Image (spheres, rainbow, N blue to C red):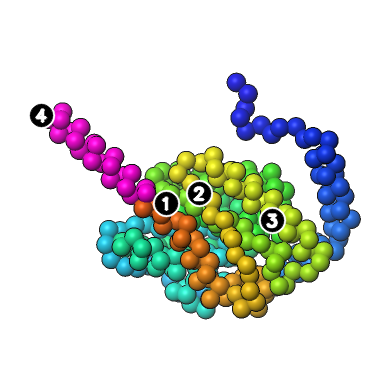
Amino acid sequence: MADATAERPFSLAELAQKLVGRAVVFALFPVMLSQAFALRRHALTLAPAVGPGAGTIGRGEPLHFLAIGDSIVAGVGARRVERSTVVHVARFMSGRLAREINWHATGIIGAGARKVRRDAVPRLPPQRFDVILLSVGVNDVLKLERSGRFRRQLLKLVRELRRHSPDSVIAYVGLPPLDEFPKLRRPLRWIVGRRVRRFDMVAREAIARVPNAMHIPMRVSPRPHMFAEDGLHPTEPGQRVLARIIADALTPHLSMAAIGGARRSLRSDRAQRGSEG
């Protein structure tokens, strides 16, 4: 049987467009590379949010929540961890689900998919998680990683997270519209805009192949007050906006998963009682 994941051949028009795009990238590569490294160097000088890497929010049936990935998970742009994206997501989930959220955050500033897989996953606690929020991709774009290699590393990372927590819901945070961020200058703005849309499409298609996993699109129109001094990371108000987008997408999925789990448990109990009778 043919491999369902094999890529179809390019048409002549698609091939011509791809070659022109690559020619433009190669022509602008020296300037673009300089701008990308300058942007990342400045971004890497920012500190993560101050505070513990784990905690508990709310009351009710416990739900174990892991956030893993890049600087968004590390809380860069927030002064304290309780004002970071991860804790805001936990707070929103607790209120909407009426559950106790036991959260754990493992974020590496400047990390792409491969580094998160190599350095963060081995340090995870043995506790199995019910929900895993994954944020990677922006640094792969800025490091000029190839989309095919990013896809392979992303799938390896997701598979390792699934091995760690087999029954978890895995939610991938989609890539934001980087070409609308204030500190990106031309030509980097043009190239990054094109690449980030490509990488987000690659991630969305890869995640769609994984059972019980979802891609959360970042449909947001950035405003100046939403950015930290580097023009790349969200401020505390920006992180609250980001957390609300994530919670709005994730919470209904968790509610349906809970309903499905309850129905399966009820059917199992009925079957067991029937066998005992």
- Tell which circle, 2 or 3, labels the residue nearer the N-terminal end: 3
Q: CA distance from mark 2 to mark 3?
A: 18 Å
The numbered mark at residue 100 is none
Q: CA distance from mark 4 to mark 1?
A: 36 Å
Q: CA distance from mark 1 to mark 3?
A: 26 Å
The numbered mark at residue 196 is 3
Q: Which residue is mark 2?
A: 214
Say which residue appears at 63% left-offset and 43% top-offset: 152
Say which residue appears at 54% left-offset and 39% top-offset: 209
The numbered mark at residue 277 is 4
| Quadrant position of residue 18 | top right
Q: CA distance from mark 2 to mark 1?
A: 9 Å
The numbered mark at residue 253 is 1
- Label 2: state its secondary structure: strand
User: In x, y percent, where is residue 63?
Assistant: 34, 57
- Label 1: state its secondary structure: helix
| Left or right position of 73 against 18 | left
Q: Which residues are magenta?
A: 256-277
- Tell which circle, 4 or 1, labels the residue nearer the N-terminal end: 1
- Tell which circle, 2 or 1, labels the residue nearer the N-terminal end: 2
Mark 2 belongs to which amino acid?
A: Met
Magenta stretch holds residue 94: no
User: In x, y percent, where is residue 86?
Assistant: 47, 66
Mark 1 belongs to which amino acid?
A: His
| Left or right position of 211 against 64 | right
